[in-house]
Amino acid sequence: MKIVNTAPLSGKGLKSLIEAKVTVTPFDIVDVHNFSEEKLAREFSDADIVLGDYTGITPITRAVVQGAKKLKLIQQPSVGYNHVDVAACKEFGIPVANTPGANDIGVAEHTIMLALSALKNFPYYNEKTHKGEWLFTEAQRTGIFELNGKVYGLLGMGRTARAVAERLAPFGVKLLYYDIVKLSAEEEKKYGASFVTMEEIFKTADVISIHLPLLPETTKIVDAAKLALMKPSSIIINVGRGALVDEDALARALREKKIAFAAVDVFAEEPPPPNHPYFGLPNMILTCHLAGSTRESGGRIMNMALDNLVRALKGEKPLWVL
């Protein structure tokens, strides 16, 4: 059997890891990270299994999969799969699987870290103190804030947002959420969360974090009109996908101090261009799509992905098919 590896991983190392899990099915691995679409299509044409690219650099397009007549599984070694044309794969009968839940803890912890960093204006005071500037009096005058007692809004209530909700419980927030699927009364009680409209979250929340999937209907769902509903003291955090937010509108709202702070782990284009509107804003924290990339989550992701590859090698039905 032929496994095509589109990720920036050593095929030799992958082969050893897979062979430790299955010994009955001989297979070869071909490394194709960052190949052109034409070259990818040639390698996919006789592939049995594909390991996706967690960096997104090697997109799996319609042109790549349309000739893949033998392909039994595309296994994405990540939760995200925006660079895979899932609709085309479905049309051609190719299952695509991800690793759901593997990085929920890392993203949830990162989200709360960003909220606390923004409330305390941590980057600013860290930088100034490193320079020997003692701004104790300024901090008292300009204000740093507690998370306790704040209204916290979750946009989306999937696995990651629920992990955030669980970890927010000790902070004493009033938790609101919006999702197209409303939780049951028992689930709302479990997470201490109340369902409201998206507009209500933007109007009332002190901190908003975004946990929505990127779909045609959610692209730029956080636009200038929604940002205009927010309080001048409010904070917004995006750990979902960059294109969920109108980046120009958010940068403008921050420059004009229509909102107090933003924290972002994801960009519409990654890496972002040098002239990105977020760069240089003093009231914005930026990280490089690393929220879910903890050492622990990486281990969970790879184990899940390889276990599913082994299922496919053995002729078993794969798990976590999208």
Image (cartoon, rainbow, N blue to C red):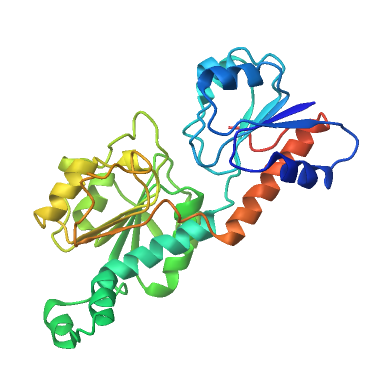
Residue at position x 32%, y 40% from top?
Answer: 244
Residue at 19 percent across and 57 percent down: it is 281
* Image position of 86 (left or right of 279): right
Q: Can residue 143 be seen at all in this image of the molecule?
A: yes
Give how far across and how far down residue 103 sits, in percent: 55, 53
Q: Residue at x 62, y 49 (%)?
A: 301
The percent coordinates of residue 116 (x first, y second) are 33, 70
In the rendered image, the vertical position of residue 170 relative to residue 45, given as above or below: below
Above or below: residue 96 compared with residue 153: above
| Rendered view: 141 above or below 76 | below
Instruction: Locate residue 165 relative to residue 76 in the image: left or right.
Output: left
- Identify which residue, 166 or 26, lies in the foreground: 26
Give the position of the C terminus as an image quadrant: top right
* Residue 313 coordinates in the image, percent (x, y): 80, 32
**Quarter of the image containing the N terminus?**
top right
Residue 238 shown left or right of residue 289 in the figure: left
Looking at this view, is 277 or 236 the one in front?
Answer: 277
- Horizontal relation, residue 135 to residue 118: left or right: left
Nearest the eye: 197 or 41: 41
Q: Position of residue 106 (x, y in %)?
A: 51, 59
